[in-house]
Image (spheres, rainbow, N blue to C red):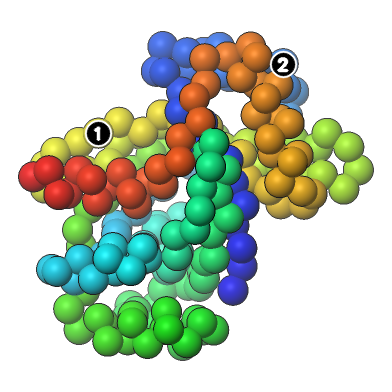
Amino acid sequence: MAIEIELKLAVPEDALPLVSQHPIIAAAPRLAVEVLDNTYFDTPALTLQAHKMALRLRAEGGQIVQTVKCAAASHGGLAHRPEWEQTYRGVFDFSAIDDVETARLLEKARDELIPVFTARFQRDTRRYQSRPGVDILIMLDTGWIDAGGQRTPVCELELELARGEADDLRQLAAILRRDLPLTPDDRSKAQRGYELFLRR
């Protein structure tokens, strides 16, 4: 199990050029620009959502990755979430999940799992290192979430901690927010997808 520590900031679409041109972001080495196709699965009764879990398949880099995330407290856009990732080989595989209750729930739901919504967005990833020992991924996501033909836009900046402390994320977010119209957003893409699905 890994713990994902990230801080999410909503970006107004008309501010995208300002974000890309910000000195910190423009100077950060670009690691990749890629289009990510994501499909989220649940039972017809939304069992996983009821237990604050998300199951996703993501097409990236010529392969499909299976990810399971469990919700955690999120404040001011900063979230700590347990997650499990592995290559998807045509069937869901929950054998690597080392949390007993999470694995048991997924195994019980396995035969009922269906696609419930999708998310497709372009991700521009850069690496920011403010000092030795701090490594932050700056990811600008632009695209949409779709549930049954209804869409909502994705336009957000994710700051993900690779090395360092959560305060390093907060400090970077504070610097960027001084210059840019960014708003902390505690909702994950999965949460937003479920909200859209339930409004159908």
Quadrant in which residue 114 is drawn: bottom left
The C terminus, quarter of image: top left
| x 74%, y 35%: residue | 128
In the image, residue 111 lies at what x, y percent? 20, 84
| Residue depicted at 45% across the width and 41% down the height | 186
Q: Amino acid at mark 1?
A: Thr
- Residue most extreme to the left: 200
Q: CA distance from mark 2 to mark 1?
A: 29 Å
Q: Is residue 40 above or below residue 153?
A: below
Per the image, the residue denoted by label 1 is 152
The residue lying at 37 percent from left, 65 percent from top is 53
Query: Helix, strand or loop at disc 1?
Result: strand
In the picture of the structure, the residue carrying the numbered disc 2 is 23
* Foreground residue among 120 and 41: 41
Q: In the depicted view, which residue is nearer to us: 120 or 199?
A: 199
Apparent side of residue 182 relative to residue 151 in the rendered image (left or right): right
Quarter-of-image position of residue 20: top right
Residue 26 lies, in percent from the top left, at 68, 21
